[in-house]
Amino acid sequence: MFKSVFRSTNSLSTIARQQFQLNGYCTSTGGFQYILSEKKGKVGIVTLNRPKALNALSDGLIGEINTAVRQFQDDKDVGSIVITGSEKAFAAGADIKEMAPKTLSEAYNTNMLAQWHDLTKMSKPIIAAVNGYALGGGCELAMMCDIIIAGEKAVFGQPEIKLGTIPGCGGTQRLIRAIGKSKAMELVLTGNNLTAVEAEKAGLVSRVVPVEELLPEAIKTAEKIASYSQLTVAMAKEAVNASYELTLAEGIRFERRLFHATFGTHDQKEGMSAFVEKRNPTWHNQ
């Protein structure tokens, strides 16, 4: 089963494929056309799988990503999710062939790209494991995730200006929050790219790892997150995300109220009792 799945796609390196097989992954394509959906223990893994198009983000591909992520969101055993692509491209951008013929009325009346933001509505943490190109919509997709871990050959950018348009799915909004106005403005107006090392230095990604270690490292991080109380993790994610929307005073107050709320949970009682009793906690996600 593993061999047949991996032979049909170039989405993972040979080393990563071997680690998938050796580490006991439960693999299922789930009837998807453009992605692979896998699960290992408490971690859900979505692999973009349009290799000939460098994982260009068509409506169909975005729809399948949303479906797979919602399935993991609803799976009580899954505590964290990883989204990745191939060694050559996480996603080289939106599907321009699909997008180019659209008119203003079509784009406006259908609220084009709105479904992309469904990813940000998930309470479970999502990690983007980025190798190769993450350009345009690919960079925006990565920024919708909660953590970005990059392979050392990853490339990030918002080159929409070269196509006579602008970023349309958060590129002008999330990028400035990640790397600041001046650097974000330069990238958006010039169409220049960032290397993985530059992206880490600018604060866009959390860390850079060797290409062959990217997926195992992302999964290791996801497994650590998934080992904690899902309820508490969701509350922590909500608090961090709120900092984008609130003033400092409002954010501190919101954080404090969520902190107070944890004292009404089973897992706070269990976690603190386990600390006092010098034992490992048993989480019930309640």
Image (cartoon, helix red, strand yellow):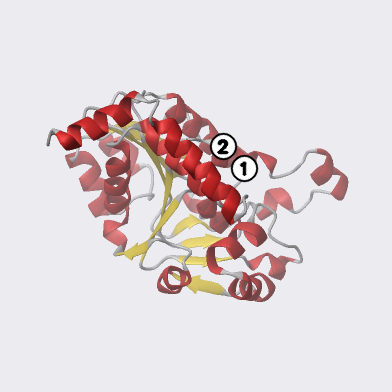
Quarter holding the N terminus is: top left
Quarter of the figure with residue 193: bottom right
Q: Residue furthest left?
A: 278
Task: Kindly identify which residue carries mark 2.
Answer: 121
Q: How many marks?
A: 2
- Local SS, label 2: helix
Q: Is residue 250 left or right of residue 48?
A: right
Residue carrying label 1: 117
Residue closer to the observer: 48 or 101 = 48
Q: Secondary structure at mark 1?
A: helix
The residues tagged by marks 2 and 1 sit, at their Cα atoms, a distance apart of 7 Å
At a point 53% along the width and 54% down the height, the residue shown is 143
Please name the amino acid that badge 1 sits on: His
Do callouts 2 and 1 mark residues in contact (Cβ within 8 Å)?
Answer: yes
**In this rendering, which labeled residue sits more in front, label 2 or label 1?**
2
Instruction: Give x and y (percent) for residue 162.
Output: 70, 70
The vertical placement of 268 against 9, above or below, is above
Q: Position of residue 130 (x, y in %)?
A: 42, 57
Quadrant of image for the C terminus: top left
Apparent side of residue 18 relative to residue 96 in the rendered image (left or right): left
Residue type marked 2: Lys
Q: Position of residue 69 (x, y in %)?
A: 48, 34
Task: Tell me: residue 91, above or below residue 269.
Answer: below
* Numbered label attached to residue 244: none
Q: Residue at x 28, y 41 (%)?
A: 223
